[in-house]
Amino acid sequence: MKPWKKLGCLGVVLLTAAVGCTATVFMSVAASQSGGGPVTAAVSAAEAGIPERMLAAYLTGATQVTGHVPGCKGMRWQVLAGIARIESDHASGHAVGTSGDITPPIIGLRLDGSGAGGNTTAITDTDNGLWDGDDQYERAVGPFQFLPETFRAYGKDGNGDKVVNPHNADDAALSAGIYLCGKGRDLTDREQLRTAIHTYNLSWAYVDDVMSGIDRYDSLGKVPTLPSGNVGAVIQAALAQQGQPYSWGGGGPSGATTGICCSPGGQDGRTVTGFDCSGLTQYAFAKAGINLPRTAAAQAGVGRRIPASAGIGALRPGDLIFYGYSPTTDSLIHHVGIYLGDGKMINAPRPGRPVRIDPVTAMPDYAGGTRLL
């Protein structure tokens, strides 16, 4: 499980650069041996922030599940992506071959009860080190971080090569889907979906983290109707930047730019042309003739403030939406986006994640909004 890293926006004014637009790519992946037609995701891998080969594994895995659990309803790629986002960040830092094999293998901490990584209960080896390279204690394996014993119980061949391997993206995605389906859950029911995720990791905080990812993936491609006038111009300007990279300190009223060094996570914005959160909002509101301050915290002081206590229902499309370490202290705000309506916002989330549509629940520390139009 990876905690959310809260990243603020910097107070710098940068030179302008050219701005590009990214179009939606329709990815079609043929279903494999369990039958069924192709599965199509009307999103781009870049927009989703998922490597193309991993997205393909989630698509085909979701399609094959009912061949193994006929009573399962509602399995979709977004659910599998929500799990893998937490467990391995979609195999980040590893190569995924055309066959789905992942190199080097993703192997978790040794579960020897030492306390490292929060593990206080020793789990002795069950596979003679076959998948985890450890013949004394277990380690979680693959992009979905199965324990070897669990994978033996649920593992299936997802790519038709007659080998069942947790280090193969297709096998792992299908197996995770089967595990989540249980004896035939209805995953279109949000409570049953939450229960399924809880069986994967007995932590409700983990469930909330996974659900926020699923909600974001569900929101992709679902853009509310644009309002008219300046509000519509602001939203349209921000939406046109979907797919632009996050650049620490990047962006401004004239568009995407390189940023500065360095984010808390180590991104050197000088090497990336794009936007950070407040750079994106500066650019969008400039289209309505509004010059915003550079930082998210300073932007909270412009316009009519909407307190967090009023709830998200008090927001209107075009409002700035804030997140902060304290919902009542503007100086502690670390993130800003633009509210789209229907519980969604457009924002530049953090290094490694492009400008995209997210649910407002994607971050836990909502700090209200500001209305400028």
Image (spheres, rainbow, N blue to C red):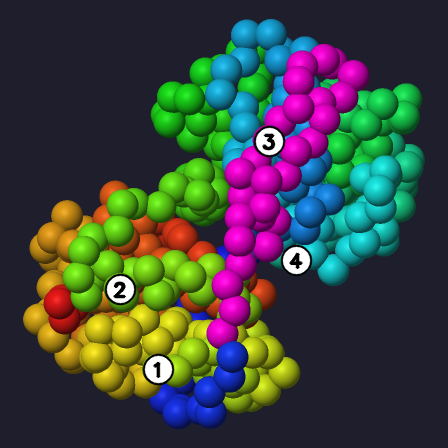
Q: CA distance from mark 4 to mark 2?
A: 50 Å
Main secondary structure of the magenta stretch: loop
Nearer the observer: mark 2 or 1; the answer is 2
| Residue type at the position of mark 2 | Ala
Nearer the observer: mark 4 or 2; the answer is 2
In the image, residue 299 sits, relative to residue 208, either above or below, namely below
Read off the residue under disc 3.
40
| Residue type at the position of mark 4 | Ala
| Residue type at the position of mark 3 | Thr
Residue for point 86% across, 38% down: 99
Mark 2–mark 1 CB contact (< 8 Å): no
Mark 4–mark 2 CB contact (< 8 Å): no
| Residue type at the position of mark 1 | Pro
From the viewer's side, name the closer residue of 16 and 86: 16
Residue numbers of the magenta segment: 19-46
Read off the residue under disc 2.
233
First-in-chain label (4 vs 2):
4
Read off the residue under disc 1.
253
In the image, residue 111 sits, relative to residue 76, either above or below, namely below
Residue for point 49% across, 21% down: 74
Element under disc 3: strand
41 lies left or right of 143: left
